Image: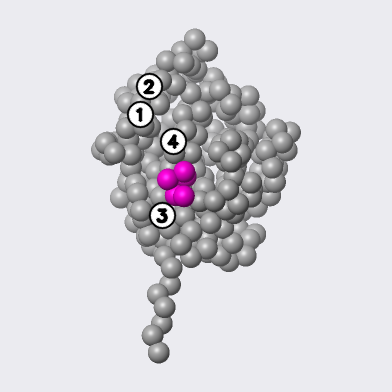
Amino acid sequence: METSVYADEARFESTHWWYTERRWLFARMIRAMGLGADARILDIGTSTGTNLRMLREIGFTRYEGLDSSDEAVRWCAEKGLGRVTTGDICDLPFADSTFDLVLATDVIEHVDDDAAALRGIRRVLKPGGRALITVPAFRVLWGLQDDVSHHKRRYRAGELRARVQAAGLRIRRGFYFNYILFLPILVARAIIRAFRIRMSSEIQLNPGFLNPLLRLIFRCDVASAPWLHPPFGVSYLVVADRPVAPTSVT
C-alpha cells in the first residue's frame, strides 16, 4: 500500500465505522469457533493492527501478525499491539501445522499469486484449524482505494470459493457483507473518478458527524449478512478449515 494509506489507517482504525464494525463481525465469527484463549492465531496482512486490537479485546493471548511492509510493523509496534513479523504471504516463515486460526482479511487481493497465498495458509494451519478470509468484491466497484492499496483484483463469490477449495481448504461459511452501502459506495467512487478528486485514501471521506450513523448502518449490515446471504456486497467473507486427514485402515 501507499505509505499515506498506512498513516490514514493508523489514525482512524480505532474509531472509523468501517474498521470498528468489521472488527465486531470478525469477533462474532471467531467466538463461534469455540477457540480457547491460548489458541495460536496468525493475522496475515496486519497493516496497522486493527485485527490485533480485536484479538486482544476478545481475550486471546497467543496471537501474532505478519506484513510485507516495514511501515506496518512500525505502526503496530508503536501501538503496542504485539509481535509482528515482516514476511511474504506466499512464503510464510512459519512451520507446517502451527496455527489454530489464520486471519487473511483483505490481503490476498494484493498478491500476484493468490493461489500460492491460499496454499500457504493451509500449510501453516493445524489439521482442523480455521481460516477467516475476506476480499473486496465486484470489479464494478474498483476505485481510488483499490489503486492506493495496490490491489490486483476484486472477486465474485464463486471465484474466491473455487480458489479456497483448490488450495485444499474446506469452506464452512461464506457470504457477502457491506451490502446496504453497496450503491452509495458505487456512486461515490464513480463521482471520484469522474471529477478526478484527489486524496490519499477514501478513509478521509468520512466526516466525523456521520461516523455514528454509518456505524449503526454497518452494524445492521454485518449482523444480518451471515443469515440473510445477500447476493452482493462490497466484501466477501469465507470461513474455511484444513480438513483432518482420514485415519488409514490397516
> In the rendered image, which residue does mark 1 sit on?
221
Q: Measure how far apart labels 3 and 4 are at the Cα level.
A: 16 Å
The answer, for residue 236, to whether it is visible in the render is yes
Q: Which amino acid does label 1 sit on?
A: Asp
Q: Which mark is residue 217?
A: 2
Q: Is residue 219 left or right of residue 59?
A: left
Residue interval drawn in magenta: 30-34
Location of residue 116 in the rendering, given as x and y in whole percent from the top left corner: 50, 60
Residue 85, compared with residue 115, is above or below; it is above
Within 10 Å of disc 1 (Cα), the crowding (few <14, some 14-19, many 20+) is: many
Proximity of marks 2 and 4: CB atoms separated by less than 8 Å: no
Q: Measure how far apart labels 2 and 1 are at the Cα level.
A: 6 Å
Examine the structure image and report whether residue 33 is included in the region drawn in magenta.
Answer: yes
Q: Which mark is residue 157?
A: none
Q: Measure how far apart labels 3 and 1 are at the Cα level.
A: 22 Å
Q: Which colour scheme is used?
A: one colour
> In the rendered image, which residue does mark 4 sit on?
25
